[in-house]
Image: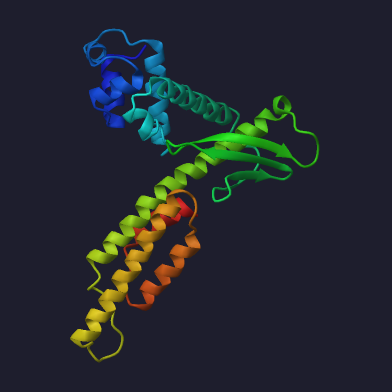
Amino acid sequence: MMTAQEFSGHLSALRLPISEASQLLGVSDRTLRRWLEGEEIPGPAEAALRAWTQLNARNLPWKPDAISVFDDDQDQIERHRRHTQEMVALLHRVEARGGPKNPWTVDLSKNTATFGPFEVGLYRLQSGGFSLSNYRRADIAPDITRDMPFIEDAAYCISKAFGKARASGPALIAVAEYTRQHSSIFARSGPKLLSAAETNRRRREIEALADKIDAIAGPASEGRATYAQFEALLSELHKNGFFPEISLISAVAHAMV
């Protein structure tokens, strides 16, 4: 049973104010405050909070879409609560058997995951998450019951790809912001100092490259940009004598490669 302290900890981890938490859990603010004061927390609310926290820790979307929240569509919010819990249960099942047994290739630009003759499609939800849309295999007739472990492995790999993609956007933005903030600090070659005009031109070129890095952050968050695109821009920065901090580059590589 979840204690009031644990309940408060989950709300803090998710950065959920009381008003928003009560809406997402389908209860009144007064009820939620009673839970925080020590009243027993019902199982459905506890299960939802634990699922949200686990998805959040994996960098996966856990909130309903903004329209459902704005309209206070409790039916859709409830559907989303069930979906998040089903997703967490799936992830746990795969991990309980040692993780995916096969190297699925996930292509978020095509909304597919493939392995050998298997192909699983995904549908992007308005909340930023996904659900599986179709399944097929090229060697024999598909059988969902027989092939469920393969399908679950695919969903697990898709979730990992979503988590990495969501991390890549902020990582790219961090590089772009650092580049703009330090655009006047770049290496110069040769004994001759650059003129004021040449220095300003170099700084503008560096800032223009920062804008291009910013521009791929959005697509990258959806799995629609590649590390090769970032590497090309990073190479241009190096040619201009600008070298972002290694930790920032490593964060992009970790998220996109």
Q: Residue 17's spot in the image, x, y percent?
A: 24, 27
Taking the spot 44% from the left edge, 54% from the top edge, the residue there is 219
Residue 1 drawn above or below residue 54? above
Res 104 visible: no
Viewer can see residue 233: yes
The answer to whether 130 appears left or right of 188 in the picture is right
| Numbered label tally | 0
Which residue extends farthest right? 140
- Closest to the observer: 208 or 48? 208
- Judged left or right of residue 71, residue 153 is right
**Snapshot quadrant of residue 250:** bottom left
**Residue closest to the eye, 230 or 224:** 224
- Tell me what residue is drawn at x 27 percent, y 28 percent: 16
Q: Is residue 194 left or right of residue 135?
A: left
Residue 194 sits in which quadrant?
A: bottom left
Image position, residue 25 (x, y; %): 35, 19
Q: Give the image location of residue 76, x and y in percent.
A: 43, 24
Residue nearest the observer in this picture, 124 or 56: 124
Q: Could you tell me which quadrant the N terminus lies in? A: top left
Residue at the outermost front position:
71
Determine whether, in the image, residue 251 is placed left or right of residue 226.
left
Quadrant of residue 132 in the image?
A: top right
Who's the residue at 44% across and 63% down the image? 230
Residue positioned most to the bottom = 192
